[in-house]
Amino acid sequence: MRHMISTALLSISVASGALAEEAEQPFGTLNPDEMTWQSMLERAEQGETGMVLCSMGYALTKSGDHGSARTLFSNCANDGYTGAMTWMSQLDGNGLGGAYNPDAAADWDRQAAELGDPVGKFNYGIALMRGHGVTQDEALGRNFVDEAALDGLKVAQRLQNAGYDLDEVTPDADNWRYAPLF
């Protein structure tokens, strides 16, 4: 008798599980795995963007997963998120999650600057002053730095106060990187 009750309960349990599974399908997944890095990456791989999704790129790059961060930031930058554009510049300018590409780095900063982003203005200004990834134009570069300073970006104000001495804002140990290649 006990065996028959156990078998009956098991049958009811299996049947109700199957019914519950069928009932869930028309309404989607109940309690989806929304806030994990993996779910964010899956959404990014499907081309989705959004403020929360784009911000996950920061956590990914800080954790050292630059390839995944690049996936998130690339989608977001292409959708017009200027913060993602400056992060793409960081990734391209340092060869993180992809090839070192100073031209692409400068272009991402230019796009962010043109959309009014103070960090993009500052970074593009420095690229212009150095001629790194873009044709050198020190006067135009200073103009971009000045705009960033007017926008309240403290590091741009610091560079202005240092007479545009680039060693004030970047270590002189990096100077080899900005030397002409020819």
Image: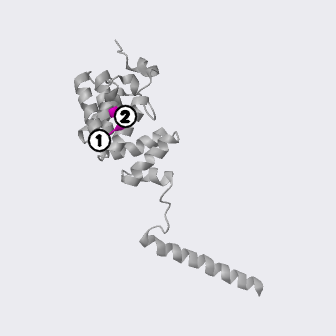
Q: Can residue 156 be found in the magenta stretch?
A: yes
The disc at residue 93 is: none
What residue is at 39 percent from the left and 52 percent from the top? 46
Q: Nearer the viewer, mark 1 or mark 2?
A: 2
Front-most of residues 68 and 15: 68
- In the rendered image, residue 109, in percent from the top left (x then y), is placed at 31, 35
Q: Residue 165: x and y, percent?
A: 35, 22
Residue range in magenta is 151-157
Task: Tell whether 63 sits left or right of 165.
Answer: right
Tell me where residue 82 appears, x and y as whole percent.
31, 43
Mark 1, residue position:
117
On the picture, is 19 further left or further right than 101?
right
* 21 or 41: nearer the viewer: 41
The amino acid sitting under disc 1 is: Asp
Quarter holding residue 14: bottom right
Residue 155's tag is 2
* Quarter-of-image position of residue 144: top left
What amino acid type should be assigned to the residue bearing mark 2? Answer: Val
In space, the residues marked 1 and 2 are separated at their CA atoms by: 14 Å
Is residue 137 visible to the viewer in this orientation of the structure? no
Magenta stretch encompasses residue 140: no
Q: Secondary structure at mark 2?
A: helix
Rendering colour mode: one colour
Q: Residues within 10 Å of mark 2 (few under 14, many from 20)?
A: some
Question: What residue sits 40% from the left and 25% below the top?
Answer: 168
Could you tell me residue 149's position as x and y percent? 29, 36
At horizontal 50% and vertical 41% (from top left) the residue drawn is: 62
> Which quadrant of the figure contains the N terminus?
bottom right
